[in-house]
Amino acid sequence: MLDIHSLIRQLSRPRILVRAARFGVDDYRRDIELRQILGLEILPRSAEIVLKLLDHEAGLNARRLDKDAHYSIADHIQTLTAIMIEVRSLKTELVE
């Protein structure tokens, strides 16, 4: 079984998606974004959230690759931004 950091290192997405996601980092509002992306009322710790976000992102990426009409680039960018922030938070939690 892979740990979270290995899963993150294995992510390989188009550079333009990653660059767009980085632009959202400064405007990220954790409570609002995570509720919107995952539909959760109570937010678990970052490790659990990262796993849920990775699962959600994998579904979005599959839609992208399949050229699914329901694919939303905005949702994909929002999810990648959330992953970036939550991984950063996870690293902070581990240090504390």
Image: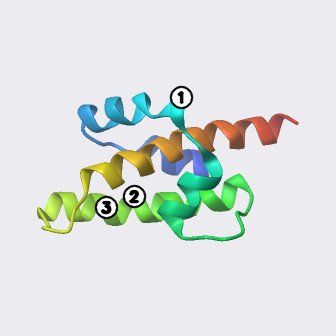
Which mark is in front, 3 or 1? 1
Residue 60 badge = 3
Residue 78 badge = none
Dot 1: few (<14), some (14–19), or many (≥20) neighbours within 10 Å? few
Residue at (22%, 62%) from the top-left corner? 71
Report the Cα–Cα distance between label 3 and label 1.
23 Å
Residue 21, horizontal then vertical, whole percent: 39, 36
Q: Nearer the viewer, residue 36 or 83?
A: 36
Residue at (41%, 48%) from the top-left corner? 78
Sequence order check: which comes first, mark 1 or mark 2?
1
- In the shown orientation, is residue 78 left or right of residue 44? left
Quadrant in the picture for the N terminus:
bottom right
- In the shown orientation, is residue 41 left or right of residue 37? right
- In the shown orientation, is residue 38 left or right of residue 71? right
> Which residue is identified by label 1?
26
Residue 92 in sight from this viewpoint: yes
Residue at (59%, 44%) from the top-left corner? 29
> Which residue is identified by label 2?
57
SS class of the residue under badge 2?
helix
Residue type, label 3 = Leu
Sequence order check: which comes first, mark 3 or mark 1?
1
* Total numbered circles: 3
Residue type, label 1 = Asp
Quadrant in the picture for the C terminus:
top right
Residue type, label 2 = Glu
Q: Nearer the viewer, residue 3 or 32?
A: 32
Residue 66: image quadrant is bottom left
SS class of the residue under badge 1?
helix
